[in-house]
Amino acid sequence: MDRLSVEHLLGIKDLNEKDIQMIFKTADSFKDVLNRPIKKVPSLRDITIANLFFENSTRTRLSFELAEKRLSADVVNFSAASSSVKKGETLIDTVNNILSMKVDMVVMRHPNPGAHEFLSKHIDAKIVNAGDGTHEHPTQALLDAYSIREKLGVVDGKKVVIVGDIKHSRVALSNIYCLQKLGAEVMVCGPTTLIPKYIDALGVKVEHNLQKALEWCDVANMLRIQLERQDIKYFPSLREYSMLFGLTMDHLKQLDKDIVVMHPGPINRGVEISSEVADSDQSIILDQVENGVAIRMAVIYLLASNINR
Ligand code: NCD
């Protein structure tokens, strides 16, 4: 059987193109399963997975849990708000206690960048990063690229603009790595204060005018302003942000082509995207959510094939 080049999914940075294509091919077959009346396979009947969420989540958490259940894994859930983390326990102690109950894989979301890499050096279980602070969100980038491949046939050669809070967004960084590995051209667009200083090192184009960015691209991925990660003000007001960088029908009508519109959710209607655009035919936002389950099934299935059982 084909194997991924990695033991854990810590970030897209560690994957090669072959890994990504393998995940897509596996997701294709799981997508077929999800469209059958019985949406379940027995593949991981002997595996136990813990979902550890130290940060809020709706989509990602449900999507992982569904993916695990569709693979017939045993699943336990943990959220920091109701746990002993509040009583002063360290991350390694929390996780080792969970692992001593014979857990094979940990899906974790954590506010600290690098928390997963740290954990991978200290515990004996497969780790999947479901978001580490402002750093990476690998399964989101995989499902985003997979959704582009589904809509446009290929990712190679396509032009993708990522619009918004590039500085604080883990979706942006993982998307940049993933799209580039698959041969797409990437542009970022947003206010200067929300574009990180190291952006040149990532080999992406930078544009501050939304209409120009839209004229250039085949796909626009609209991101939420990560207000919860901002300790100072990066722009005068949300109203101004939305006037300069919010995607509306007027923008789309001015183009002489139909671009694909994406958003990882949660969307803030009327801020980064208008309701009309979010609900339009050009938006693939709900396809992204649907594809998330198949992509996460593929990642978990491929990583589980390296577990000694
Ligand atoms: C993203 C996240 O949590 O990083 N959402 C998600 O996983 N679907 C994006 C965001 O919160 O803006």
Image (cartoon, rainbow, N blue to C red):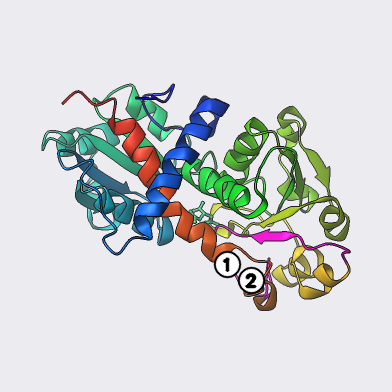
* Residue 184 at least partly seen: yes
- Residue 34 x/y as whole percent: 36, 57
Q: Does the residue labelled 2 lie within 8 Å of ligand 1?
A: no
Is 240 in front, or is 297?
297
Image quarter in which the N terminus is found: top left
Residue 9 position by quadrant: top left
Query: What kind of element bears circle 2?
Result: helix
What amino acid type is highlighted by mark number 2? Ala
Picture quarter with the C terminus: top left
Residue 49, placed above or below residue 13: below
Disc on the earlier residue, 1 or 2? 1
Q: How many labels does the image show?
A: 2
User: Gap between marks 1 and 2, in whole Å?
Assistant: 8 Å
Looking at the image, which residue is at 60% across and 70% down?
268
User: Which amino acid type is shown beneath numbered disc 1?
Assistant: Ile
The residue identified by callout 2 is 278
Which residue is the site of mark 1? Answer: 267
Residue 36 position within the rendered picture, expressed as x and y whole percent measured from the top left: 33, 60
The magenta stretch is 255-274
In the displayed structure image, the side of residue 243 where residue 225 appears, left or right: left
Question: Which type of secondary structure does the marked residue at label 1 adopt?
Answer: loop
> In the drawing, does residue 64 fall left or right of residue 281?
left
Q: Do the residues labelled 1 and 2 touch (CB within 8 Å)?
A: yes
- Say if the magenta span includes residue 297: no
Q: Nearest the camera: 62 or 99?
A: 62
